[in-house]
Image (cartoon, rainbow, N blue to C red):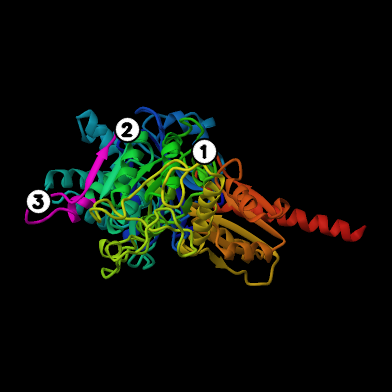
Amino acid sequence: MKRIEAINDFVIKFANVNGSGSASANELFAKAVMRMGVPVSPRNIFPSNIQGMPTWYEARVCEKGYHGRRGGVDMMVAMNPQTWDADIAEIETGGYLFYDSTRPMPANKFRDDVHTMGVPLTEIANNAYTDPRQRQLFKNIIYVGALSVLLDVDAEVFEKLFAEQYKGKERLLESNVQALHLGRNYVKEHMQAPLGIRVQRADNVGDQIFTDGNSASGLGLVYGGATVAAWYPITPSTSIPEAFQKYCSKFRVDPATGQHKFAIVQAEDELASIGMVIGAGWNGARAFTATSGPGVSLMTEFIGLAYFAEIPVTIVNVQRGGPSTGMPTRTQQSDLLSCAYASHGDTKHVLLFPQDPYECFTHSAAALDLAERLQTPIFVMLDLDIGMNQRLCKPFDWDDSKEYDRGKIMTAEELEAGKPFGRYRDVDGDGIPWRTLPGTHPSKGAFFTRGTSRNPQAMYSEAGPDYIYNMERLIRKFKTAETLVPQPILRKALAPTRLGVMYYGSTTPAMREALDVLERNGDHVDALRLCAFPFPDAVRYFLAEHDTVFVVEQNRDAQMRTMLINELDVNPAKLVKVLHYDGTPITARFIIRSIHESVAKSAQAHEAKETV
């Protein structure tokens, strides 16, 4: 039987039971491959319900450095009888099945076109350990040990990882090393190794770091100057304020007095959290909240207040499947419309689309600057895939000489000198008024704030011209934002083409690989990665230069495509939907197939027309 042969280029998937302790073992495997100098991109696919339900961990091993999901599984580590049939069906022809053979399985439970390797993991664990919990936990390390021989990963790599993890806890160190070698010894004595897929030492990781987007965002908010966080727990965003608290405890505590120079409040609900953040922003603090789609829904009226009263607010939205409670532990890019136009009436909000943990760090920091510069809510649009899954990325960097952009804040000296102040008056033509901070001056430049219609001096007014002035000024401000947000990234095809593709956020890793494959196959497509909304002029130019533009996104209703049509008045027929929304991260194969089939269909239609 033919077998898949690949060095440093395969997909391995672990099918486990939630709460079995498998997550740390699977992560150990991924880190060991990285220590071999080979890039790995792992993804947790876990349930939003109780212990005992199925969970999966998919690791893409790729020396070329592709971080997106490829599609397909070369090796399945099937440790969950509940999902056996579906797990086995995912394996590529010629691939590999690894399972616990302690109990015999019927012959009809296997595939003839897949190579099967059974190791009696439960039996080995039961013979070595008497405590039931130890048996379960160490069974995971035993299968990691077995895989290390089958895939040719050096034992000393794991031993060094154990030594780092259990420094000062020699008893735990010794027991984990023992379990590792129980699995290694069994394979050496009973099986042929390595397999057709294996790991070979390389030097392709370099100085990249391994972290998740939520942790990166939390650190970026610290470096960006946030001092106040108010939040309510919700999957999958909770780890952002947790990370913020951890980093603040390290960087925002006075070493002499022990005084905390930050405030973090777990509010009673999302409404309270956004209200606190608006209050902090009004008082001059850099403040943020982190939430997901259902939280944004609850915050909508307060978001409208911050927009119309023009108060700096940063909102990090880690998107998940919806509507309602939807799929809390599944990923989607499903909140674009709800965030871009959050609130009643006419509103438009700035959205930032980071592609990896590095940009989660930089965009979260930049959002705080933009919020104050524009005096408006700024959304940082993560999703579960980029937020909760660890990824390799370039090291974070920061210029210590950087000064925060506080925007147009009038000082006491300027007020004392007689500089005119109208809270909602546009004096520069960019739509952004001047503001003062509370307590700036004892009698001049009071910080008026209104969520109702007003004139430029913040006096209550329902006069039509005053309302129109404010609304048109807010549009000018939104236009100014086009020049301040991160600009789109263009990738030109190797040959001239009238085909284009647009994408954004966590779709980027899979898109990068898809573009390379399409190019090799002769499908030349110019690509533009959208980094923010509002759309800068470069987006308009790209649309004008191409006859057909594929819009790749992970939601059902083509929300980015809708925004492009609404905002840029583009012909809808020009924009072709490429939509992925099953809750799992999009794959390169899905993108390749969708674009290639569409291009081929268009070519056939053109040929038929020419023939007629």
User: Is residue 365 visible to the viewer in this orientation of the structure?
Assistant: yes
- The percent position of residue 217, horizontal first and vertical second, equals 34, 52
Residue in the image at 37% along x and 64% along y:
394
Q: CA distance from mark 2 to mark 1?
A: 43 Å
Mark sitting earlier along the chain (2/1): 2
Q: What is the number of the mark on residue 258?
A: 3
Q: Amino acid at mark 3?
A: Gly
Q: Is residue 477 left or right of residue 220?
A: right
Q: Which residue is mark 2?
A: 19
Residue in the image at 56% along x and 43% along y:
555
Instruction: Report the span colored magenta.
Output: 247-267
Pointer 2 with pointer 1, Cβ within 8 A? no
Q: What is the number of the mark on residue 344?
A: 1
Membership of 261 in magenta stretch: yes
Q: CA distance from mark 2 to mark 3?
A: 38 Å
Q: CA distance from mark 1 to mark 3?
A: 44 Å
Q: Nearer the viewer, mark 2 or mark 1?
A: 1
Residue in the image at 63% along x and 56% along y:
568
**In the image shown, does 367 or 437 lie closer to the viewer?**
437
